[in-house]
Image (cartoon, rainbow, N blue to C red):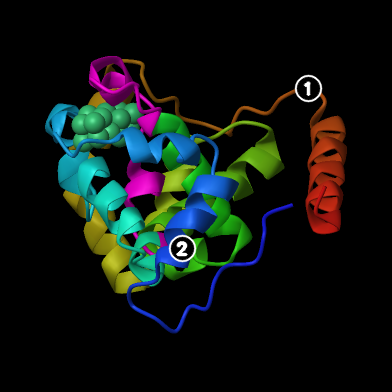
Amino acid sequence: MTAPLPDPGKAYDLAFASWVYDNVNGGDKLALCMQCGVCSGSCPIGVEMDHGPRKLFMMIRAGMQEAVLTSNTPANCTSCYRCVVRCPRSVPVTYILQDLLAKQVELGYAAKQGDNARFSRSFWWSARTFGRTDERLVTALYYFSFGLKEGYKRAMDNLKIAVAFVRKGRMHIGLPHRIKRGAELRKILAKAAEIEKRGE
Ligand code: SF4
Ligand code: SF4
């Protein structure tokens, strides 16, 4: 189980850097980072991150607990591993970001990331209900989570893309596809939630 966070009151607290080294998968390799920026420069999704991996690692080392735990960088990483392949110091950038995301969720910080939390709720609703993600319903739920007016606007803005997908056979019309043994999947998810609650 993850150790408790250091005192969150300080903007800079080196105890947070130690906490990451000890509790985040790959965190012990952060000391190897020489801040060259190859990871951030190689990242195809960097423009969607509030801080590139290089900067996030600098923030960890500076003990910026609140800023790191509320960053959208871990959630936006697509795990393409380009940074890992290119890092000259073999820092496991992707693993660090993946586990930082898990820690953000576990410690309640992920819910503060509006967009990612909304999308995640839509995604999980579809996965739990149908056993798969129905891109139409996931997108609609996500759009309308911003309210009727904003949802309609977003839907209209992207209507052309949706129609093109349907024409090319990349998006089906009709009822959502379901897996055959949905009840068993829901039992697995319930068991996982129970284990998570016990903190194993
Ligand atoms: S590529 Fe590696 S060494 Fe360079 S900034 Fe990124 S993690 Fe650090
Ligand atoms: S694994 Fe994540 S951080 Fe690394 S290059 Fe890909 S998207 Fe960017």
Could you tell me residue 168's position as x and y percent? 28, 15
SS assignment at label 1: loop
Where does label 1 land, which residue?
180
Q: Establish whether ligand 2 lies closer than 8 Å to the Cβ of label 1.
A: no
**Toward the viewer: 148 or 13?**
13
Q: Which quadrant of the figure has residue 2?
A: bottom right
Q: Residue at x 44, y 52 (%)?
A: 119
Query: Is residue 81 part of the magenta span, yes or no?
Result: yes
Rate crowding at label 2 as few (under 14), some (14 to 19) or many (20 or more) other CA atoms within 10 Å: many
Q: Is residue 135 above or below residue 148?
A: above
Give the labeled residue for mark 2.
16
> Which numbered disc covers residue 51?
none
Residue 35: x %, y % from top left: 18, 39
Q: Position of residue 56 (x, y in %)?
A: 28, 51
Compare marks 1 and 2 and give the one earlier in the sequence: 2
Position of 42 relative to 71 (above/below): above
Residue drawn at x 21%, y 36% as measured from the top left: 34
Q: Is residue 1 left or right of residue 167?
A: right
Nearer-the-camera pick, 187 or 40: 40
Residue at the image point whose x is 46% and y is 63% from the top: 16
Residue range (magenta): 69-93
Q: Is residue 34 magenta?
A: no
Classify the position of ligand 1 by quadrant: top left, top right, bottom left or bottom right: top left
What is the CA distance from the residue labelled 1 to the residue labelled 2? 46 Å
Q: Quadrant of residue 182?
A: top right
Q: Quadrant of residue 36?
A: top left
Q: Residue at x 44, y 84 (%)?
A: 9
